[in-house]
Image (spheres, grey):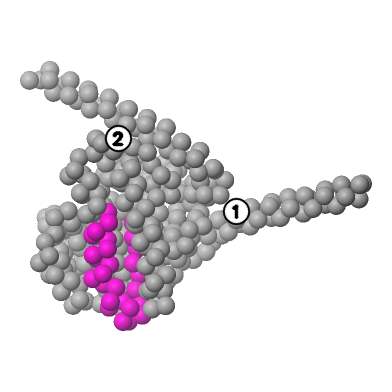
Amino acid sequence: MLNYCRALQTMFAYVGIGVVAYYISLIITLVYDVFLRAGVDLKKFGAGKGAWAVVTGCTDGLGREAALELARKKFNIMLISRSAEKLEAMAAEVQAIGVEARTIAVDFNNVSEEKWTQMAQELSAVRVGVLVNNVGVSYEYPMHVEEVSEEKIDALVELNMRAMVKMTRIVIGQMKERKCGLILNSGSFAALIPSPFLSVYSGTKGFVKYFSQSLAAEVAPFGVVVEHLQTYFVCSKMSKTRKPNFLIPLPKPYIKTVFNKIGVEGGTSEPYTSIPYFSHALMAFVAERLAPKQSAINYNRGLLSGLRKRALQKLQRQQAEASKSQ
């Protein structure tokens, strides 16, 4: 009996050592990924060799910084967004860096088949090395699903899902033919942890995640890289966050990290996914590896419920002020 107890103690000791060693290896990998590991060199995709980078939703926030950073990396830039005036201003900024810039004005919430055909023709006329599917939309504030308007639901589907699939289909053929290309799809932590009060948005970002992962495995034998970029809050109009902090960076340093870490997983165990920014990687590491999923969802519910409450209070104040001024 004594020998049996000792054997049991030894077994549990080895199991404990194994578990500790496993988590230490994960932490070492996290630190290596975010601080030391270099990403794929963008020259592989045609940087400095006359290739074009296509960026949707490029006149503000992450899209704007992605276009400018890719221009600094010596890609010619195809700018696609809604406002022709803003596109021309962006094109001037890109050209000032020393590369070519072209623009396509399109409202991805309302694209005719003729416009899709036109965009396909324009993109087939250039060598596309990189596609950044950045265009997207979220809620004005957290809502119950029945409160979300039909127009908003249509916009979430069109901008977050359909535009990404259609743009990918336009460029994927030439990338496979040349056995070279990078497609970067803008995701969200709403696909990492389900987000109560953002249910439709969270669902669309889940689509982005699984579409990206499925396509990445499909086209990997052709030398094409598809990456799902899973992002927490970054200061932008869409996130309604202006002041940066440890968890919420400005767009420029965030995007610089993204393009320096292509192919680097960061804090995630998900295939074909990158969480390159340190604080985001740390949060994802805790959410994926340490926190029970239900606890994470409950935390999200409390966080978003608080944001909803504050947004409604602000809306009520604005309505009261508007009534007084009449």
Residue 137 x/y as whole percent: 25, 48
Q: Residue at x 33, y 37 (%)?
A: 197
Give the magenta range: 160-186
Residue sitting nearer the eye, 161 or 87:
161
Label the magenta part by its dominant secondary structure: helix
Along the line of sight, which residue is nearer the eye, 15 or 4? 4
Q: Name which residue lies at 35% across and 61% down.
A: 211
Disc 2 to disc 1, how far (Cα)?
Answer: 38 Å
- x then y, percent, for residue 323: 12, 20
Expressed as whole percent of the image width and height from the top left, the position of residue 95 reads 21, 66
Which residue is tagged 2? 144
Seen from the viewer's position, the closer of residues 104 and 139 is 139
Relative to 220, say whether 309 is above or below.
above
Q: Is residue 66 visible?
A: yes
Residue 245 picture quarter: top left
Q: Secondary structure at mark 1?
A: helix
Which residue type carries mark 1? Answer: Ile
Give, as a three-letter code, the residue at label 2.
His
Examine the structure image and report whether residue 167 is included in the region drawn in magenta.
yes
Chain-order first, disc 2 or disc 1: 1
Q: Which residue is mark 1?
A: 27
Q: Residue furthest front?
A: 1
Above or below, comparing residue 96 to residue 143 in the picture: below
Left or right: 294 in relation to 79:
right
Q: Nearer the viewer, residue 148 or 98?
A: 148
